[in-house]
Amino acid sequence: MKQKPDLSFWKLWNLSFGFFGVQIAYALQSANISRIFATLGADPHNLSYFWILPPLMGILVQPIVGTLSDKTWTRFGRRIPYLFVGAAVAVAVMCLLPNAGSLGLTVSAAMMFGLIALMFLDTSINMAMQPFKMLVGDMVNEKQKAKAYSIQSFLCNAGSVMGYVFPFLFTLLGISNVAAEGVVPDSVIWSFYIGAAILILCVIYTTSKVREWPPEEYREYNPVAEGNESSANWFALLKNAPSTFWKVGLVQFFCWAAFMYMWTYTNGTIADTVWGTTDVASAGYQSAGNWVGILFAVQAIGSVVWAAVLPQIKNMKVAYMLSLVMGGIGFAMVPFIHNQYLLFVPFVLIGCAWAAMLAMPFALVTNALQGYGHMGAYLGLFNGTICVPQIAAAALGGFVLKLVGSTQSNMMIVAGVLLVVGALCVTFIKEKK
């Protein structure tokens, strides 16, 4: 088997550049879904249930995309066709979702329309997102893999910054940030429109710049024959997965449950602790919604900076643990800060955890999977360690909220505890050198 060649910085960049556009779409979803459904009329205790669909679609879609793309060979490549189709569907749905309250529907019908649109949006985002991780696994050697995933993390967070600040920026430009009861403000609607346009342009760039290896060349660099690749059985793959796959998955469980609660309850938390309102129709609540986007952008900037630091820490496990503990401290600080600008501090710390979550698990797992084959299928299955904890956290969100006094800000403390537990679980991982 031939050694995969070193790739120039710009080739590594091009492999992941489309992720920038995909992440804008993901950022718009994660920062605005609670705001959209609360505006449509959802009760805070039911808010987390709307978040079950995104990870549920992820756990269904990504293993299928991974397995099918392992067996796909076209003149456009094996991963890129799925990337392009997913992005095209995402663009269409991004133009529909924020208009759920503007179609003259009843409250229940508007929420049902929003749920269906959200289901298609997350399905398409997952379909577009997974091929980028697979491209790195396919084409990047072990020496450069951490660097490749760090570039991917940088682009991911840079895209997040843009997606998060759109509603705030468009409000500054004079687009209305308030609307009739049950209607999503124009500032959010236009954010989704512009995000959709950037997404398709970024994906077109990657598909035009990246040339995937044809079957013969692929087999020269990867140890498993095509016949073996096509016979993947998910249960057999999971049974034979390396222990690192499961141990990293345990860490993932606590980390992604923590971030699910952040996405679900930050809007209500900031509206209450900084703006002093829980009225979703008020200008204060919508202003808090814009500021949540700014805070998430600060988190993303912190992630960009920390992603550049992570490769300099020689011990990957130490870097992973340190990042998660910093994020846990950040979450615990949020309920006690009532100045909107001082909130930048905890969200920078949360960004450090996010950077590690995007880079470290895939570097650890893809290193452990060398020689196992079925890289796409395994990474699709590994997505379950992202989706399952989100589904569990979303399903239990209303119950946990009642346990902590029905105060949304207390859910930030819950998130902090979960991240610290995740950091402790990193000690179980045995890193493959």
Image (cartoon, rainbow, N blue to C red):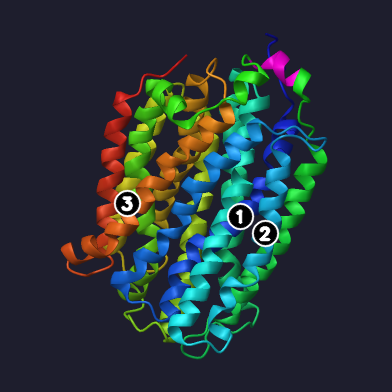
Is residue 366 positioned above or below 100 on the image?
above
Callout 3 crowding tier (Cα within 10 Å): few <14, some 14–19, many ≥20? some
Residue 392's label in the rendered image is: 3
- Residue 49, percent from left and from top: 36, 64
| Viewer can see residue 160 | no
Q: CA distance from mark 3 to mark 1?
A: 22 Å
Q: Residue furthest top?
A: 1
Residue 401 visible in the displayed image: yes
* Disc number placed over residue 89 in the picture, else none: 2
The amino acid beneath tag 2 is: Val
Q: Amino acid at mark 3?
A: Ala
Q: Which residues are magenta?
A: 217-222
Q: Is residue 403 left or right of residue 340?
A: left
Q: Residue at x 46, y 35 (%)?
A: 382
The residue shown at (32%, 54%) is: 393
Say which mark, if any, is on residue 388. none
Q: Secondary structure at mark 1?
A: helix
Spatial CA distance of label 1 from label 2 is 6 Å
Q: Quadrant of residue 160?
A: bottom right
Q: Is residue 118 left or right of residue 248?
A: right
Residue 145 painted magenta = no
Q: Element under label 3?
A: helix
Image vertical order of residue 279 relative to residue 236, above or below: below
Q: Earlier in the sequence, mark 2 or mark 3?
A: 2
Q: Quadrant of the N terminus?
A: top right
x, y (%) of residue 239? 39, 24
Q: Amino acid at mark 1?
A: Ser
Residue 124's disc number: 1
